[in-house]
Image: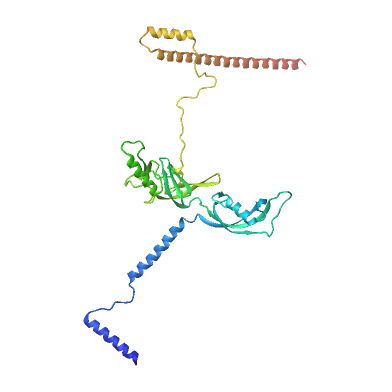
């Protein structure tokens, strides 16, 4: 009975609201609100995926290792192993293919350590979790610009790891290098220099006397905070330290971005081994040439000296050609003589055979 009375009163309120021209707010969500909420969820998923893309270089590896603990840690083997693992931090370990950042969950695989022969070091097999920074070629990372030059851009990833982007991997068709003011430039006073230093300290990076800017808009390369996204194209390992080589080209692995070494072409033919580099002249010839140069005003002495050197060189070349021709003729003559002697010897043999 009470339910029927409630329904009757609800119908009366609806009729009264309809007569007054007032519509009640609907409790159902409109289609636009649902679409907006769905798009927001999808966008949040995309943003989360982007934030994870730069963290793919970090990973945790379960590693096993055989260590030799010095006898000073005989009473505390765990402390000795941990100290040895601490020496691996911030170093590139080839077996782990990355830089070790931290280690945890140390575990001894054997219940007892072994000592071989007279060596006092305890040999232990251990396992541990290693947090490793292991970037791979082709991975996209982001670093903060700390130095710009016409040849390369230097960045810091996570304020620790060095990255270098060479010039041939910078989009020079869109960006160009803009030189900054010199330290002793009179147009820029001490106040300007202090302001630049303060700005550089606030931003946390140094532009190195210049910057890469867009050719059309003039905006700096990178975002407002100085971060730049790049593609890893190479790893450089030196003294157990890892540094990266990056590229901001749309197709970083294209052969078009490989620098070509300049090829030098010889403008003069190579001299033969028998040909002398300089033509030697006697002091008498040089003195005569200088005296002749003093008497005549038409030709410069240095030009005459060069002409005489050319003439001497041509004379020497002709003499060498004549000597070579004479040598060829002598060879031909000796060859003819040897053939004639062979023919005479054959005739003598044939005559002897006939007589016999």
**How many numbered discs sit on the rendered protein?**
0
Q: Tell me, yes or no, if residue 175 can be seen here.
A: no
Q: Is residue 16 above or below residue 288?
A: below
The relative height of residue 306 versus residue 45 in the rendered view (above or below) is: above
Q: Residue at x 40, y 63 (%)?
A: 44
**Between residues 25 and 39, which one lies in front from this camera angle?**
25
Q: Where is residue 139 in the image (x, y as percent from the top left)?
A: 48, 52
Tell me the quarter of the picture where residue 267 sits. top left
Near-viewer residue (227 or 86): 86
Q: Is residue 6 above or below residue 240?
A: below
Q: Which of 246 and 106 is in front in this view?
A: 106
Q: Identify the image quadrant of the C terminus.
A: top right
Residue at 41% from the left image edge and 7% from the top image edge? 291
Residue 82, percent from left and from top: 60, 55
The answer, for residue 198, to whether it is visible in the render is yes
Q: Residue furthest left?
A: 20
The quarter of the image holding the N terminus is: bottom left
Colour basis: rainbow
Give the vertical position of 207 relative to 317 (above or below): below
| Residue at 33% from the left image edge and 90% from the top image edge | 4
In the figure, is residue 163 to the left or right of 20?
A: right
């Amino acid at each position: 009975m009470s339910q029927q009375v409630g329904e009757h009163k609800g119908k009366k309120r609806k009729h009264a609201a309809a007569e007054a021209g007032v519509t009640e707010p609907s409790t159902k969500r409109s289609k636009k609100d649902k679409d907006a909420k769905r798009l927001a969820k999808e966008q949040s998923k995309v943003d989360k995926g982007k934030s994870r893309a730069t963290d793919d270089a970090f990973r945790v590896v379960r590693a096993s290792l055989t260590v030799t603990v010095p006898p000073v840690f005989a009473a505390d083997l765990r402390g000795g192993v941990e100290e040895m693992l601490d020496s691996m931090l911030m170093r590139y370990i080839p077996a782990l293919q990355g830089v070790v950042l931290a280690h945890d969950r140390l575990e001894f695989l054997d219940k007892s350590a072994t000592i071989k022969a007279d060596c006092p070091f305890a040999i232990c097999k251990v396992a541990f979790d290693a947090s490793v920074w292991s970037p791979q070629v082709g991975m996209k990372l982001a670093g903060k610009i700390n130095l710009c030059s016409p040849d390369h851009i230097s960045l810091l990833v996570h304020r620790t790891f060095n990255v270098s982007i060479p010039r041939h991997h910078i989009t020079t068709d869109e960006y160009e290098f803009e030189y900054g003011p010199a330290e002793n430039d009179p147009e820029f006073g001490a106040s300007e220099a202090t302001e630049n230093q303060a700005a550089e300290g606030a931003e946390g990076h140094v532009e190195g006397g210049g910057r890469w800017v867009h050719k059309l808009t003039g905006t700096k390369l990178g975002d407002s905070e100085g971060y730049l996204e790049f593609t890893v194209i190479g790893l450089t390992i030196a003294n157990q330290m890892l540094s990266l080589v990056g590229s901001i080209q749309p197709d970083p692995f294209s052969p078009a971005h490989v620098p070509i070494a300049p090829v030098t072409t010889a403008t003069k033919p190579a001299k033969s081994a028998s040909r002398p580099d300089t033509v030697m002249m006697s002091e008498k010839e040089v003195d005569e040439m200088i005296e002749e140069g003093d008497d005549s005003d038409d030709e410069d002495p240095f030009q005459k000296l060069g002409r005489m050197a050319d003439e001497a060189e041509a004379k020497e070349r002709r003499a060498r050609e004549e000597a070579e021709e004479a040598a060829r003729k002598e060879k031909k003559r000796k060859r003819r003589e040897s053939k004639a002697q062979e023919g005479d010897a054959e005739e003598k043999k044939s005559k002897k055979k006939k007589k016999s």
